[in-house]
Image (cartoon, grey):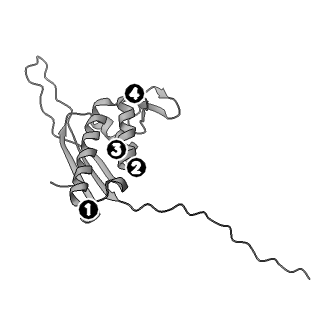
Amino acid sequence: MKYSLKSYDKEHMAKAIGVALPVSFKQSVEICNFIRNKKVSSAKKLLQEVVEKKRAVPFKRFDFDLGHKRKIGPGRYPENASKEIIRLIESVESNAQFKGLNTSNLVITHINAHKASKAWHYGRKSRRKMKRTNIEIFVQEKKEEPNQVKTRKEKPAEKKE
């Protein structure tokens, strides 16, 4: 398999790829942008809300002729693509667990969608090509840093003469 991410740390990262998934490429790109750099648990929760039509995915690139959703602008509820990506996230999570990584600290560092080869719908009068997408996911174990409160530096009092 060829992946698009070149800097792969075998000790702290895990990967998975979905080949020729029967989902829309455009919707997959928008979902990937939606969950990139999020924790695995929160990404699964967000996509489950998309499947239940409680949260819309904001469409920023492929947004022509889209209705606006509350608080996000143009958006949709891509159910099938969300289900496939949830399956991929669970797969990469189990790969990470097999490697011995802590699954509660996993963050999606790289997620990408590529167009796959298109197959024909056979048996039709006017044949069409099916939508196919390759999706790759890389997760990395991140250590949780405690929230540090920034303190202001006090300026020394100037002496007036």
Q: Which residue has dot 2 on it?
A: 38
Q: Quadrant of the N terminus?
A: bottom left
In terms of secondary structure, where does tag 3 sit? Answer: helix
Front residue of 69 and 62: 69
Sequence order check: which comes first, mark 4 or mark 3? 3
For the residues labelled 2 and 4, the Cα–Cα distance comes to: 20 Å
Residue at 25% in and 55% down: 97
Mark 1: few, some, or many residues within 10 Å (few <14, many ≥20)?
A: few
Image position of 15 with respect to 153: above or below: above
Q: Which residue is mark 1?
A: 6
Residue at 40% of width from left, 49% of height from top? 38
**Circle on res. 161:** none
Q: Secondary structure at mark 2?
A: loop
Q: State which quadrant residue 33 falls in.
A: top left
Tag nearer the camera, 2 or 1:
2
Q: Position of residue 136 (x, y in %)?
A: 25, 49
Kindly identify which numbered label has been placed on residue 53: 4
Question: Which residue bears the numbered disc 3?
Answer: 32
Q: CA distance from mark 3 to mark 1?
A: 18 Å
Q: Tell me residue 131's x, y (percent).
A: 21, 32
- The outermost residue toward the right is 161
Q: Earlier in the sequence, mark 1 or mark 4?
A: 1
Query: What amino acid type is highlighted by mark number 2?
Result: Lys
Name the secondary structure under disc 4: loop
CA separation in Å, label 1 and label 4: 36 Å
Image point 25% across, 40% down: which residue? 87
Q: Callout 4: few (<14), some (14-19), or many (20+) C-alpha neighbours within 10 Å?
A: some
